[in-house]
Amino acid sequence: MARNIFNQPPADDNKVASLSPAPARSTKLPGSVGGLRDSLREITANSIRDIEPDQIDMDGLRDRLILEDSSIDELAESIRKHGQQVPIMVRPSDQHDRYRIVYGRRRLAAIRKIGGSVKAIVRTLDDDASLIAQGQENNLRLDPSFIEKSLFIKEMHEAGYKPSIIQDALGLTRQGVSNHRVVIEQLPEELVRMIGPAHGVGRRQWGELAALAKRVQLIDIAKETLGELPIETPSSEKFQAVYAACAKKIKPAVRLAPKGLTTVVKDENGSPLATLAVDGKAIAIKIARKDNPEFGQWLEDRAEATLLQLFDQWQSERDSGS
């Protein structure tokens, strides 16, 4: 289960807004003086402060494909009329009087458009805790799309974060993380960024597009297709247009010279786990006993039950329309 690090004690903005980031730990003072200092540190660590946007660096991993679109303008207008209702979170930078964004990149971008200070919770977090806070807060406020999560997972993996940290950041199981990685590793990142977040487009649809990556020139088709669409076309419609164009290209090739697709499935360490072969007649999963003898035996003992379970899951997802 993901660790929840968002519960903050209530703070009075007027009383704590002028406090600076918590100082480094020093020698503990005796008696009431030491207790007072500890109390001040506790208040400061959880306070909401007014910080100038230019003091905040937009570093860290991006968990959104779009930070500059019409929704940012709408958010900026809302903040201008009603004020900033939800603070962002930052952590102290190595540079004096500067901070690093943890979460709230959209709110920060909106406030930079209209001017003024930004309300922020200042927390001293290491890289792992910062990443978990970023992922959990985004899941709670505006659920990222499937492909945004997939890109975020890819970037976390490439940055060297442990699998347990990645799982906690997005509230996913190990299998859930794997499902995202299988898709994103087959897709050109340029294509994903051209299409955008595509909210409402799930793993199955992105997986079907990924399956075409070895059979058609996805980038070329996407550029041609998207170039004919209005700029304001929603991202989900861009996906559907690109997918339809790719599918149209592949149909004649399938009729004239059908060819099977073979994919090597790898584990989280990049080691070959199995070979997936798909053609017009069958789907075959091959596990080499010499590579994974124990797993091969385990799967052999459970193959029938596992296949029935997958079939039941497919029926359930089909009936629910997912």
Image: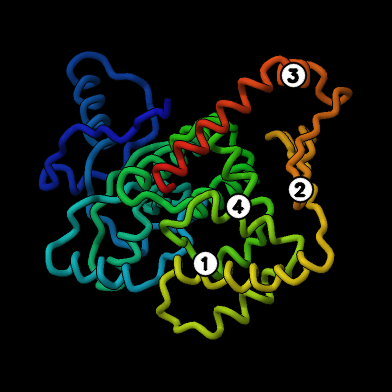
Toward the viewer: 90 or 72? 72
Numbered mark located on residue 207 in the image: 4
Give x and y (percent) for residue 29. Answer: 28, 19
SS at mark 1 in the image: helix
Which-is-in-front pick, marks 1 and 3?
3
Q: Is residue 181 above or below residue 3?
A: below
Residue closest to the far right: 290
Real-space CA distance between mark 1 and mark 4, rounded to the nearest whole angstrom: 12 Å
Give x and y (percent) for residue 187. Answer: 66, 58
Q: Amino acid at mark 1?
A: Phe
- Compare marks 2 and 3 and give the one earlier in the sequence: 2
Q: Which residue is mark 2?
A: 281
Identify the residue at image location x=71%, y=68%.
250
Q: Which residue is mark 3?
A: 300
Q: Quadrant of the N terminus?
A: top left
Q: Amino acid at mark 3?
A: Glu
Q: Quadrant of residue 303?
A: top right
Numbered mark located on residue 250 in the image: none
Which-is-in-front pick, marks 4 and 2?
2
Q: Which residue is mark 1?
A: 239
Q: Tell whether 279 sits left or right of 64.
A: right
Which-is-in-front pick, marks 2 and 3?
2
Toward the viewer: 4 or 148? 148
Give x and y (percent) for residue 168. Answer: 46, 33
- Compare marks 1 and 3 and give the one earlier in the sequence: 1
SS at mark 3 in the image: helix
Labels 1 and 4 touching (C-beta < 8 A): no
Toward the viewer: 319 or 85? 319
- Compare marks 4 and 2 and give the one earlier in the sequence: 4
Real-space CA distance between mark 4 and mark 2, rounded to the nearest whole angstrom: 19 Å
Count of numbered circles on the image: 4
